[in-house]
Structures are given as C-alpha cells and as structure tokens.
Image (tube, grey):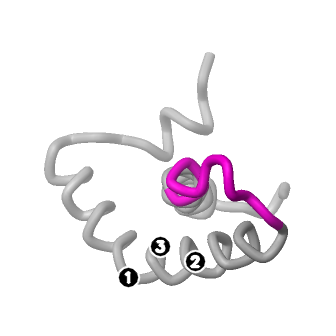
C-alpha cells in the first residue's frame, strides 16, 4: 500500500518468509485449513520474533528498509 512504511514492508516480508517455511513443512498435505493455520501461526511468530530480528539486523549494520524500498 502507498501508506506503508519501510518497517511495514520488512515486517510483511519477514512474515512471508516464516509462512513459506511453515508451508514447506506441510508439502504434500496442503489444504485450505492448513494454509489458514499457517497464516495465523506466522502472524503469531512474527509478533513474537520480529523486534528481536530487527534489533539484531540493525546491530549488524543491515539497512533492510532502504534496500527493499530502493532496489535501483
């Protein structure tokens, strides 16, 4: 969305990565209920893990928001 901040974009990307990992574990047994559960669980995991991830990334000098929003 146009009003999304760089942190919103990084958080969404982080959640997508978490969800992809969960869906890969379900390979061969995907159903709509499994996918819905993975979306809900990835949201919980993102809420629990994102701030620590962001802090560690910043301490390593990563500038993720700038990278994602200015690819050129």
- Look at mark 1 in the image and give the residue it sits on: 48
In the rendered view, would you say 20 is above or below 61? below
Q: Position of residue 63 (x, y in %)?
A: 36, 41
Residue 28 in magenta?
Answer: yes
Residue 43's disc is 2
Q: Secondary structure at mark 3?
A: helix
Task: Give yes or no for contact between labels 3 and 2 (Cβ–Cβ under 8 Å).
Answer: yes
The structure residue drawn at horizontal position 55% and vertical position 71%, both measured from the top left corner, is 42
Q: Quarter of the image holding residue 31?
A: bottom right
Say whether marks 1 and 3 touch (CB < 8 Å): yes
Q: 31 or 61, which lies in front?
A: 31
Farthest top residue in view: 72
Q: Are marks 2 and 1 in contact (CB under 8 Å)?
A: no
Which region of the structure is painted magenta?
22-31
Q: Nearer the viewer, residue 9 or 17?
A: 17
Query: Looking at the rendering, in which quadrant would you find the C terminus?
Result: top right
Residue at figure coordinates x 59%, y 57% from the top left: 26
- Going from N to C along the chain, the mark reached first, 2 or 1, is 2
Secondary structure at numbered mark 1: helix
On the image, numbered disc 3 is attached to which residue?
Answer: 46
Is 3 situated left or right of 10 in this image? right
Q: Residue furthest front?
A: 28
Query: Residue 19 at what x, y percent from top left?
Result: 58, 59
């Amino acid at each position: 969305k146009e009003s999304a901040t760089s942190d919103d974009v990084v958080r969404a990307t982080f959640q997508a990565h978490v969800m992809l990992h969960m869906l890969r574990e379900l390979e061969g047994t995907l159903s709509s209920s499994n996918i819905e559960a993975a979306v809900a669980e990835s949201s919980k995991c993102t809420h629990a893990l994102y701030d620590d991830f962001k802090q560690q990334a910043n301490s390593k000098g990563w500038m993720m928001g700038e990278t994602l929003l200015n690819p050129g």
